[in-house]
Amino acid sequence: MINIKTPEEIELMKKAGHLNYLTREYLKTLIAPGITTKELDDEAGKFITSHGGVASSKGFEGYPGNICISVNEEVVHGIPGNRVLKNGDIVTIDIVVGLNGYQADAAETIPVGDINKEKSFLLKHTEKALYVGLQEVKNGVKLGCLSARIEDYAKKHKLGVVHELVGHGIGKEMHEDPDVPNYGKYNSGITLKTGMTLAVEPMFTAGKRYVRLLNDDWTIVTQDKSPSAHFEHTIVVTDDGYEILTGE
């Protein structure tokens, strides 16, 4: 079932989204060669809880980290540990914040020091694809319009679209209906309605789109070891467009 949020619920999600934004901005000041993913995760947990929030990924279906931290060929769900970030890496921070009973989900892929042209191109166009897709969003539009635009943008720039992972509805729960694919047919799928809240999250690769699960049962990587990028915002559908809830 797809939940339509009341104005009061949307305000609560905005507050969770603002804390998510502040957490991402804080972590970006720490991301540099020499820091470990565990150190970043510890700082994220402390920051979220010190502001009254909950790091919702912690313990979710057994996940051990406060946030998901994925490096280079890791697409999503990387587990924080002793890995030291190096100059030239790219690192995705995927954060779900709970506050006052509501969730906000957002992700960014961030360069570590100086990155090469391939990774820079990947980051630029994965992020751009998010906003190209969001341009389709408003009350009465089919969800497939958003999905198709994201896929078309990826194909235009010769980037791989991961099919096994999709965005999702969000609200009181981290994952709600509907699924929000980054591929599909224009004018297909459910009809978007004012008050729907969605986590929209393009996940692209610089090589082939195919992925595999590592032995830790969490980390998903590209099969060809090509770098991957991930950008995500939680949004609410409005009468004539959308509003980002995980921005400033």
Image: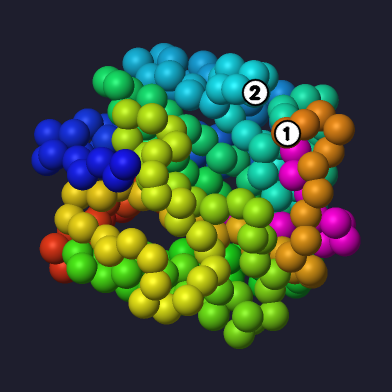
Which residue does the image show at 42% across and 78% down from the upper left? 186
Q: Position of residue 13 (x, y in %)?
A: 27, 35
Q: Is residue 192 magenta?
A: no
Residue identified by numbered label 2: 63
Q: Nearer the viewer, residue 52 or 197?
A: 197
In percent of width and height, residue 202 lies at 54, 60
Q: Position of residue 157 (x, y in %)?
A: 64, 81
Secondary element at image label 2: loop
Pointer 1 local density, CA inside 10 Å: few below 14, some 14–19, many at least 20: some
Question: Is residue 222 covered in magenta?
Answer: yes
Position of 66 with respect to 137 (left or right) is right
Q: Is residue 212 above or below residue 217?
A: below
Residue 117 in view in this figure: yes
Tell me whether circle 2 and circle 1 mark residues in contact (CB < 8 Å): yes
The CA span between labels 2 and 1 is 8 Å
Which mark is on residue 218? 1
Q: Determine which quarter of the picture holds residue 226.
A: bottom right
Q: Nearer the viewer, residue 237 or 43?
A: 237
The magenta stretch spans which residues? 219-231
Which image quarter holds the N terminus?
A: top left
Looking at the image, residue 226 sits to the left or right of residue 138; the answer is right
Q: Secondary structure at mark 1?
A: loop
Residue depicted at x 65% and y 54%: 164
Residue at image location 63% in from the left, 34% down from the top: 68
Colour scheme? rainbow
Residue 155 found in image quarter: bottom right
Q: Amino acid at mark 2?
A: Tyr
Number of numbered callouts drawn: 2
Q: Is residue 240 above or below residue 50?
A: below
Q: Position of residue 8 (x, y in %)?
A: 12, 34
| Residue at 60%, 75% in the rendered image | 154
